[in-house]
Image (cartoon, coloured by chain):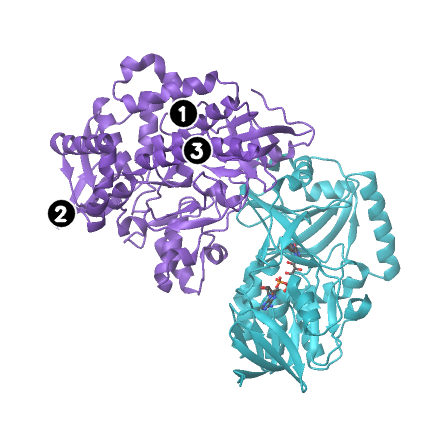
Amino acid sequence: MKKDFDLVIIGAGPAGMSAAIQASKFDMKTLVLDDQLAVGGQVYRHIMQNSNKKKDLSFLDGDYWSGHNLADKFLCSSIQFLPESRVWQITKNKEVFFTQKGKAHCVQAKSILIATGAMERPMPVKGWTLPGVMTVGGAQILLKTACSGADGAVFAGSGPLFYLTIQQYLRAGFEIKAVIDTRPKKMSLVAYIWAFPSLLQLRLLLKGIRWHSEIRKKLFYFSDVKSVRIIGKDVAESLCFTDAEGREQRISANHIFIHQGVIPNINLTMATELKHRWCRRQLCWKPKIDMFGESSIEGIFVVGDSMGIWGAEAAVFSGKIAIQRIAEKAKRSVAIKTLISCLYRWRQLAIRPFLDYLFKPPEDWLVPEDDTAIICRCESLSKTDISNAIKLGVSGPNQLKSFCRAGMGRCQGRLCGLTIQKMIANHHGQSEEKIGYYRLRPPIRPLTVFELATLSNDDSTAEK
Amino acid sequence: MMIPRRRNKVIVIGGGIHGCATAYFLAKRGQIVSIIERDHIARHASGVNAGGVRSLGRDLAEIPLSLASMDIWNNLHDEIGSYAKAFHPSFYLKVAIDEEGYAFGSARAEELERAGYNHEIWLESSDVQSRLPKLTTPTYGGFLVEGDGWAIPWQIVRGFAQGARQHGAEIIEQCNVFSLELKQNCWRLKTEKGFFEADYIVNCAGAWAAELAFQSGEPRMPLAAYAPMLAVTERKPPILPAVIGVLGHTLSLKQIDTGQFVIGGGVRAAANLGENSGEVVLPELVKSMRLVAKLFSDIAYAQIIRCWSGIEGYMPDNLPIIGHGKQPGLIHGFGFSAHGFQLGPAVGKALADLVMDQQPRIPLDAFRPDRF
Ligand SMILES: Cc1cc2nc3c(=O)[nH]c(=O)nc-3n(C[C@H](O)[C@H](O)[C@H](O)COP(=O)(O)OP(=O)(O)OC[C@H]3O[C@@H](n4cnc5c(N)ncnc54)[C@H](O)[C@@H]3O)c2cc1C
């Protein structure tokens, strides 16, 4: 028999952990699955392992360590947690399929909480595939998990995580060669308008301003940069760009970290055929959810950054709210408490629109200027390859797949989907929303023939 | 007043392999043809199928059609030019790995002999092993057809569409046909892009065809829609020179030119005709995966990177509908029950014959629309 759970939570980041803690208070039989070795998600990656070397890791600040409390509560609660569990399909009947340690399992849930977080926006600038180029998020993970970094690195891009990681890099004692900031100097009018509500989160705002001014003062810093390209034969050798005065610049570097913000990780929500909408402000797809996080399929909730980018604090809240909602639905009541939590959450969201407008990714990071830039990494397709296929008369990303195999590799379009959608939209002069995204299908993570073969109906006892 | 936008002699509904091949042969013979397709050419079963070009294991009634089709496949360049490169002939081997499979094979061998067919050859187990050196399970032998193979399906369909266009056919995509009716010997189609008229209609609307026919005044035909599923793995070094099936099991396995394995063979999920989408329920493929892992342990550790399904129309006897409808000028070609891709070229020719009132070279009696 399949094992039954009241609740299955996918992802043990801030949203998933806080949801699980809440669920244990309601005595829900809960299973939490996470791909990683341990709890924490992206923000609090390695939090438990790091907690006893706090002194050596002074580059991590209070916001990071606040995750320790959450993780501790989570691990002490009564819920079942299975790390290294890769979920590859959720069905409409709320069966959750995953592999753990080479074996496939299936569990049946009454409710499902998807808290799979965000991923970094793909950045198909010229040379982004060269060895030596990494995302800023990737560089940060190395710092958090292994305290490792590279001296003489160049950071290029923009966004909150961009500044945060540079800060951490500095404090960890690594030498940074240059910071190439693509944010335009002039703030747009909408950004000015949204600056007012962001005052509600003054602490974060001030923190950001402080980071920025420190970076400007301490580092070799270029602002308002355009046309970033990474040059190199077999590995990254240098970074070229146009500076604010319109001069061509070239900085040699073997380690280049790039970043243009994060977007919800939609492969699971899309493959589960939840309804999605295009968010023009954050330039990404988001699952359609109600104020409690419930998606277009009853009983499937999406919380944290996988429902839209709101940050860790808001994620903690959204996890809690969703569980309160599930508990109330079971009792067929709506408690004032949940509504108040929802209201309170708005405070946590106040700064987001401002950040979104401030750090809007520049056009040339969405679709590269250079025709030879690689767009589909799995199939090694350049911008020219894609443009040629589009010219054959392609109406959307799915048709493009068969014309040139874009998006058919192992990443399932994670790294080319948005670029291709935009290129087709530009070609037809239509909105990206109209053009649509790849039709995503399970498995959302690769699994071997053998792993799938091990799935059986009568056994689902995964190893703890 | 409704003013007809155009007047066509023949309208083919559906831009799948059957619609496109029919339009091609009609246009080649000088007819005025339009294809009307709701989505884009090869969007459904014909573009996303497993690409198996298989004459092996066909129902006896289907063998003449399948062999006639093979003749066209073998000279495909003459019809669709460089698109024919998408066809990769090799051999098809359907092995017996258990007693039931062997019994099934023996019965089939007798049946074929009685009917006088000799295109399927029985191989002894040692011959199977030498043809498939990487096989990791003993067999009781198997059927072989030399020259069967696989193709990249959407390219073949595009080839026929392009050929039809070159002979003057018109292809209208993104155009749903809402209804059709016969008025004073003339067919009138109501579509997303206005009204069309034609003397002949060829109904190649795949899984949607029976509903369209019924609504036009034909008797109800028992067509059911399902979504057969396929899985494809990452790229691996070449180990599999042929397309593989297993007697008594639903499996088809091949390694395509990219090195990827394509695993399928008739396991089907639910289809939603209203939304034109098929489901993918991976766990249904567990049995196929066990079989693959047993047959070739090399493939067991290949990662499955993608699964998909396509919507197909099935008839209760798993044989297609090919023939004149009850109403004059209406000709049906659908219900291929998950093995219609290979038949496409010959069906196209046969449907063109029917439109032009010529006797098809192949007996179509088993496929009569009124057989139920
Ligand atoms: C996953 C899968 C694997 C398969 N593997 C093989 C294989 O290996 N070998 C093999 O021989 N066969 C295989 N088949 C079967 C084969 O693909 C089909 O039998 C064949 O493609 C059917 O072609 P068709 O043209 O009849 O239908 P379709 O390709 O479905 O075309 C019908 C077209 O009609 C259009 N249409 C429908 N209604 C309307 C309307 N009202 N107005 C306008 N247009 C309309 C649809 O949009 C569609 O494009 C497989 C099928 C599937 C799904």
Numbered disc in front, either 1 or 3:
3
Q: Label 3 sits on what residue type?
A: Ile
Q: Position of residue B31 (x, y in %)?
A: 61, 82
Q: Nearer the viewer, residue A270 or B163?
A: A270
Q: Nearer the viewer, residue A241 or A1?
A: A1
Q: Position of residue B129 (x, y in %)?
A: 72, 40
Q: Where is A248 relative to A76, above or below?
A: below
Q: Position of residue B259 (x, y in %)?
A: 54, 45
- Does the residue at mark 2 contact the one at mark 3 (Cβ under 8 Å)? no
First in residue order: circle 1 vs circle 2? 1
Q: Quadrant of ligand 1?
A: bottom right
Which residue is rendered at x = 63% and y = 29% of the image?
A4
Colour-to-chain, purple: A
- Does the residue at mark 1 contact the one at mark 3 (Cβ under 8 Å)? no
Q: Position of residue B119 (x, y in %)?
A: 77, 58
Q: Is residue A385 visible?
A: no
Mark number displayed over residue A336: 3
Badge 2: residue crowd in 10 Å (few <14, some 14–19, many ≥20) = some
Which residue is rendered at x = 42% and y = 58% of the image?
A435
Both marks 1 and 2 on one chain: yes
Mark number displayed over residue A63: none
First in residue order: circle 2 vs circle 3? 2
Q: Label 1 sits on what residue type?
A: Gly
Q: Secondary structure at mark 2?
A: loop
Instruction: Give the residue number, with chain letter if any, for mark 2.
Output: A244
Numbered disc in front, either 1 or 2:
1
Mark number displayed over residue A40: 1
Chain letter behind tag 2: A
The C terminus of chain A - image quarter: top right
Q: Secondary structure at mark 3?
A: helix
Hue used for the chain lettered B: cyan
